[in-house]
Image (spheres, grey):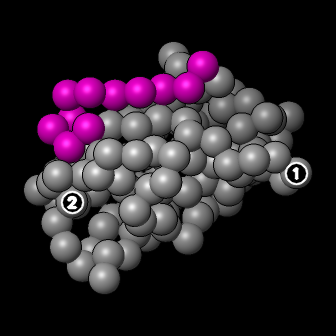
Amino acid sequence: QVQLVESGGGSVQAGGSLRLSCVASGRTLLDYAMGWFRQAPGKERELLAGIGWTGGTTYYSDSVKGRFTISRHSAANTCYLQMDSLKFEDTAIYYCAATENNWGRPDYWGQGTQVTVSS
């Protein structure tokens, strides 16, 4: 049983930064891509960023490109999301996920961590 546990969420003023961490346990995820989604109240869950199992391939949604950076430490089964220049509209619950090959249906999800950005 794989568990993903996020940490690092919290409250910050607009323009500030936060770093989210996701630690996987239960098995190694060396052959899985890892990524971050978010869901704001009344909105659908959206994929923000993804990173391949080697860390060499990354994806960013247009809404966070240039402001967020995804990275992973595969040996430590950990994925990070560095969030800079945060905006009020970044307020949401952020979820870590892992998938073998389908971001439309990730294999594993974390429980989520709240990020609140005040203007």
Q: Amino acid at mark 1?
A: Gly
Q: Foreground residue, 57 or 18?
A: 57
Which secondary structure dominates the residues rendered in magenta? loop
- Residue wearing tag 1: 42
> Residue placed at 19% from the left, 73% from the top?
27
> Residue placed at 21% from the left, 60% from the top?
29
Q: Which residues are magenta?
A: 52-62
Residue furthest toward the bottom?
Answer: 1
Q: How busy is the neighbourhood of tag 1: few (under 14 within 10 Å), some, or many (20 plus)?
A: few
Q: Quadrant of the C terminus?
A: top right
Callout 1–callout 2 Cβ contact below 8 Å: no
Say which label, 1 or 2, has the lower sequence index: 2
User: In screen coordinates, is 75 left or right of 45?
Assistant: left
Q: CA distance from mark 1 to mark 2?
A: 32 Å
- Residue wearing tag 2: 29
Q: Secondary structure at mark 1?
A: loop
- Residue 55 percent location from the top left of the image: 21, 35
- Residue 97 percent location from the top left of the image: 44, 56
Q: Quadrant of residue 18?
A: top right
Q: Amino acid at mark 2?
A: Leu
Q: How busy is the neighbourhood of tag 2: few (under 14 within 10 Å), some, or many (20 plus)?
A: many
- Residue 57 percent location from the top left of the image: 26, 27
User: In screen coordinates, is 89 left or right of 105?
Assistant: right
Q: Would residue 108 be visible to someone looking at this image?
A: yes
Q: Quadrant of the N terminus?
A: bottom left
Residue 8 within the magenta-colored segment of the rendering: no
> Residue placed at 48% from the left, 26% from the top?
60
Rendered view: 26 above or below 20: below
Q: Secondary structure at mark 2?
A: loop
- Residue 90 percent location from the top left of the image: 72, 38
Q: Quadrant of residue 30?
A: bottom left
